[in-house]
Image (spheres, rainbow, N blue to C red):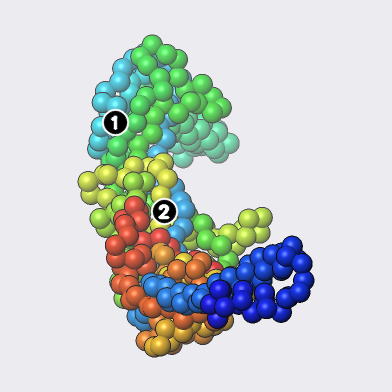
Amino acid sequence: MPPDLIMKVIMSRVRGSNLFMATVIGRFSFILAMSLIGACGEQSPPPAPAPEIRVVEVIQRDQPVFTELVGETHGAADVPIRARVEGALLGLHFTEGATVAKGDLLYTIDPTPYETLVVEAEVYLAQAQIRVADENADLARIRPLVEIGAASEMELDSAVAQYEAAVGGVRAAEARVQREKIRLGYTRIEAPIDGRIGMTAAKPGEFVGSPPNPMVLNSISDVDPIRVRFTLDERNYIRLARKRVTQGLGEAVEDKNPESKFELILADGTLHTHRGRLVATDEKINRDTGTFTAEAEFPNPDELVLAGQFARVRVEIDRLENAILVPQRAIRELQGIFQVYVVDADGSISLRVVEPGYKIDRLQVIEKGLESGEQIAIEIARLRSDMTIVPRLTQLNQDGSVVEESAPADPVNRPAEKGP
C-alpha cells in the first residue's frame, strides 16, 4: 500500500481528535509503514558454493619396508702398533695417513743394548759348547777303562750324567741367544698387515715401550672391506631372523646372495656404491640394553669410507603385497582413533576409521579401512563430515608429496616406522 494512502486512512479515523495527536500518530504510522515496506523488499542470500578441495586416489603397490640401524665403521682389521721392547725411538719410516704393506718398516728403536745382550748370550753358548766337548772327552776316556775293570760303573754313570748336563746347557744357551736375537728384532717395528696407517703418537728421541702397557705408537686399518657394527632392538632382530637373511640370523634361503640385503648410508645422506652382507653377530641379546649386536661388511675399493665414521645401515625387514598407502597429512587422529575423509563421486564426504601401519617417507600404510580406487581429501583442516565439495584430483610423487610440492631434501628414502 502506498504511504500517502496509508496516511489518509489514519487521518480519517482520527477525525475529531486534536491536531497534535493526529500528527504524532501519523508520523508513527509512516515510520511503521516504511519498515514494513523495507522488510518486504529484502531477499535471503544465495547459498555459498561448495569449496574446491584437493583429493588423491589411494595408492596400491607392492611396498618394501626398510629399517635403519645406527652404527660405527671399523676396518676389517684394526691393529694397534706398540713397541715390544724399551728404548729411544730413532726413526719413522712411513708417511702418516698413507697406505703401507705388510712387512714395511715403520719405526726403529735404538738397538745397542740388545746387540750387547746377543753377544753376551753367544759367549755363554760358546762356553756351554766347550763344556760339552770336555765332558764328551771324559766319557770317551772312562768307557774303555770300565771295560777292562780299571774304572767303576759309578764313575761311568757320573761321566754320562755330566755329558748330558753339558748338552742341556748348550740347548739353554742356544735358546738364550735366540731370545736375545728376537728382542733385537723388536727394535725394528714392521707393519703387521696391509692398510692405512695413522698419525704417530711418538717422535724420534722419545723413550717408548715402558711396561706393563706400552703406549700405542700408531694403528693400521684395513678398510677394504669396511665393516659397520650396529645394534638391533629385539623387535627388529625377530623380523630379520624370520626373513632368514644370512647364516648369522638363519640360513639364507630367500635370497642366495645375502650381499643384496644391506645398504650403507653415508654421512651426507648418499648411498655407498656397494651393498654389503652380514658377517658377524653376537651370541645373545644384551640383557642390560635389550639389543643385539651385529656387523655388516661392505666392499670399499676406493677407501671412501674410513674407520671410526658414523654410519647408518638400511635393511629390508618386510615386503607388503598390494599395500594401500595414503599421505600422512590426510589422516586425522582423535584420542587414538585414526580417520580419513573419503570423497564419493558426487562430492559428498564422510569420515572413516582406518587402521594405520608402517610410515614410509610421507606415506602411511593403511592396513584396514580403505580399498583400492577410493579417493580421500588431503586438506582436512577445511572439512566437516556433512560437507559437499568440488574434488580436485591431485597427483602424488613416489614419496607421497604432492607433485607441485618440493620433494624432501634427503635423497635416500627414510626408513619405515610402525604405527602412525
Name the residue rendered at 25%, 35% in the picture: 100
- Quarter of the image for the C terminus: give it: bottom right
Mark earlier in primary sequence (2, 1): 1
* 269 or 163: nearer the viewer: 269
Tell me the tag on residue 97: 1
Q: Nearer the viewer, residue 229 or 26?
A: 26
The residue pinned by badge 2 equals 312
Q: Secondary structure at mark 2?
A: strand
Disc 2 residue type (three-letter): Arg
Q: Is residue 162 above or below residue 269?
A: above
**Whole-percent x, y for residue 307 in the image:** 38, 42
- Residue 68 in percent (x, y) is at 44, 60
Extreme residue in the top direction = 205
The x, y position of residue 284, in whole percent, is: 58, 63
Question: Which one is in front in this view, the residue at disc 2 or the one at disc 1?
Answer: 2
Residue at image coords 48%, 26%: 215
Image quarter (top left, top right, bottom left or bottom right) of the N terminus: bottom right
Disc 2/disc 1 C-alpha distance (Å): 25 Å
| Residue 249 image offset from top left, x and y in percent | 47, 70
Residue 224 visible here? yes
Which disc is residue 74 wearing?
none
Q: Residue 81 falls in which quadrant of the image?
A: top left
Image quadrant where residue 334 sits:
bottom right
Amino acid tagged 1: Gly
